Image (tube, grey):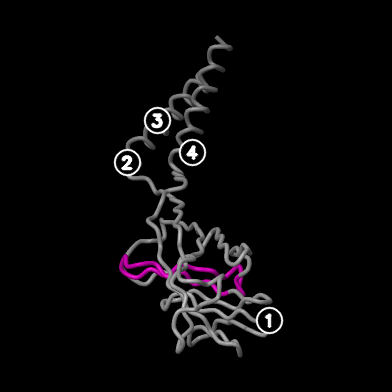
Amino acid sequence: MNLVHNLSIATVATCLSFAVFNTNPGRAVTVSRTFTVSDFSLPGIGITNNIPLSPGNSYSGVFTYNDELLTGSDLKDIPILNLSFNFLGTTYTERDDVFYPQFPKLDIQNGTTPILNFVINKPGLAANFNSSGFVFGLSPSASAGRNETGYSVVDPNGLYVARVSYGSPTVVSVFEPSSVAGIVCLTCSGWFVSRKKVKA
């Protein structure tokens, strides 16, 4: 009886310590951002005149990342959790990056506009997202890569460029470790109390 009583008191005290000392708990926040690719052009020629890449068309996508990693003022290279980009009838995901699972990533410096770091190298589309926007080739012989000096996209039929704009961050989910610990503590407290009542 005394053992159960003491354990119950200790458990409640532990729960109270979570309530008192975790007034600012660590939070893992998953954030979603949309992005849009538009304003297509062929450098040296101007606005493209083919139907899929006409000036009025745009293509959108969305990605998620852990906002908890956005701390400090240094350049942040944040892993992308999930990505979906529908372009010319095909949906590309984070798994289509040439260096998955190390990439894609999101570059943010001093809270400035994010830069999606995503490279696709598939038959019929070689492309990358970088600080210049979206650069790509549309022939089966096109190729794309990522190296120490930056990015590379090659297409003997010519390269296209487009502008990339990003939407505002939207919170998708929040995970607080202290909340989970609190639930466990309260559950254990209830169990100890019920045990005490049964034995009484």
Q: Earlier in the sequence, mark 4 or mark 2?
A: 2
Q: CA distance from mark 2 to mark 1?
A: 57 Å
Question: Helix, strand or loop at disc 1?
Answer: loop
Magenta stretch bounds? 97-119
Of the pair 85 and 21, the residue shown nearer to us? 85
Q: Which mark is residue 23?
A: 2
Residue at (60% x, 87% y) in the render: 155
Would residue 102 be counted in the magenta stretch? yes
Earlier in the chain: of badge 4 and badge 1, it is 1
Secondary structure, mark 4, is helix
Separation of marks 4 and 1 at Cα, in angstroms: 51 Å
Residue linked to disc 1: 140
Give whichever of discs 3 and 2 has the lower sequence position.
Answer: 3
**Spatial separation of the CA atoms under disc 4 and disc 2:** 14 Å
Q: CA distance from mark 3 to mark 4?
A: 16 Å
Residue wearing tag 3: 13
Q: Nearer the viewer, mark 4 or mark 1?
A: 1
Q: What is the three-letter code of the residue carrying label 4?
A: Val
* Front: mark 3 or 4: 4
Residue 91 image offset from top left, x and y in percent: 62, 62
> Could you tell which of marks 2 and 1 lies nearer the N-terminus?
2
